[in-house]
Structure formats: structure tokens, C-alpha cells
Amino acid sequence: MSRPTSNGQLAFDLDEMIHELDVQNAAAWDGAPLHFTTAYHSPDDLEAAFERWVFEHGNFGCLQRSHMWHPGITTAHANTATAGHELRIFDVDLRCDHYRENCACVGGSLTRGICHPCTWHHDGTETGVVEAWHDHAWPGWRTLPVIPAKIAKTDDQNRPSKKYRAWIEEHYPAEWQLPGAPVITERSRYGTRHVPGRSPWNGFDLSHTATHPTGA
């Protein structure tokens, strides 16, 4: 004798049936590959492909199961203020999620930066991608003055202090005080991530370790 099906289970099964029908009736996919690829695709195409994979297979564990490029959680639109350029960042999780199965998982994770107006792209670590994009879009950035840590501190609302802005206006060339431009700040040994949107012009706040790798 079969057990009675609860209303909750019935609703779940019905949702599954509806979803399977939606997938079956969806138009054939002709966009970017629904798997890991090293080929160049525009940011919008990569986003659309990832959304299609999620539509077909669900959200649960989608980053690792799909092995697909997806927008960076905090860096998706890392820099859209620079004239003629943009930096869109995507991550991919290539770690193996198989158990006792043969697979071709590469392992690890990877970051891709894309400047779609130029079809420029670069794969590597997040740090390497951000620095490579600045070499592309803001050549010469490595010679910018390093803002001392005591000057770069923010106030209680995490806003740049008047002292910070005054220091930049005095020491940074006028041609580097433009929308999307970066600043370089002195960091502690444990706080060296390049932070998007934290320069006065909505560009990156870059760690001084990019230009002084020994911390000097």
C-alpha cells in the first residue's frame, strides 16, 4: 500500500513537471557554450549562457556544477566609468564535484576580465586581471604616487576624508583625475586586494603592492 502524498510533496512534484515542460518547450540554445570555454564571448553573452544553464539545471550548486563563467559577486561591473573602456569581471569554478566518477574537471578557479569595447580579455587571478586591465585602459598607472595609509583612512561612514581628497588633488596629475581613474594606496600586508569603485572617480583603489611587490 503506497503512502499518501503530502500537499507539499504534491506541489513540489507539480512544479518539477511544469519546469520540465518549460525546458522542453524552450527554444534551442544558440548562444555561448553551456560549459567551460576559453573562447572570447561578450559579457552579455556569458551572462545569458549562465542564466540558460541555471534555467535548465537549477540554482543548487550551479557555480561548481556548471563550470561556467559567471559575473563576479562583488566585481561584475568593476569599472564602467572609463571613457572608451570597461572592465567586466567573470569567475569560473573548475573544481571537481564528481564522486567515484571519471571526469575531465580541471580543478581550481579562474577569473576573466573583459573590455568589450576593445574585445580585450585576460584570464588569471583577480589581482592579475585587474592589473592587466589597467595596463590596457590606463597605461602609466604604475607611476602614480602612492597615497600614505594614514592619509587614505576613511571616516566613520567609510567616506574619504577631506585630508585624503586634498592630498590627491595636490599630488595626482590633472589628467589622472578623470572618471574611472585609479588611485594607489599604501596597504598593510593583509589588506592588498584591489577594490573597485573606491577611487574619488569611481575607479579602483589599487594596492601599492602592485608596484612595490616587496612592500617597500
Image: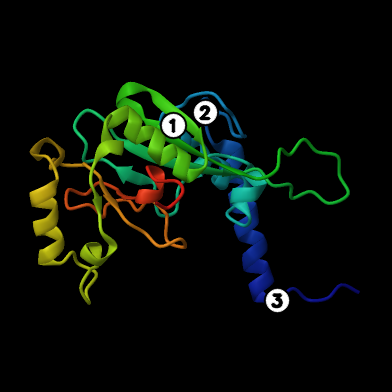
The front one of 31 and 46 is 46
**Mark before the other along the chain sequence, 3 or 1:** 3
Where is residue 75? Give x, y as percent.
39, 49
Relative to 179, is 43 on the left or the right?
Answer: right
Where is residue 185? Give x, y as percent.
29, 54
**Mark before the other along the chain sequence, 2 or 3:** 3
Kind of residue indicated by mark 1: Asp
Q: Which image quarter is the N terminus in?
A: bottom right
Q: Callout 1 environment at 10 Å: few (<14), some (14 to 19), or many (20+)?
A: some
The front one of 148 and 3 is 148
Asked whether the residues under the numbered discs 3 and 1 touch, taking CB atoms below 8 Å apart as contact, a structural biologist would say no
Q: Disc number at residue 95?
A: none
- Mark nearer the viewer, 3 or 1: 1
The residue that appears at 42% across and 56% down in the rendered structure is: 192
Relative to 151, is 123 on the left or the right?
Answer: right
Kind of residue indicated by mark 3: Ser
| Residue designated by label 3 | 6
Asked whether the residues under the numbered discs 2 and 1 touch, taking CB atoms below 8 Å apart as contact, a structural biologist would say yes
Quarter-of-image position of residue 141: top left
* Marker count (numbered): 3
Relative to 98, is 60 on the left or the right?
Answer: left
Q: Secondary structure at mark 3?
A: loop
| Residue designated by label 2 | 32
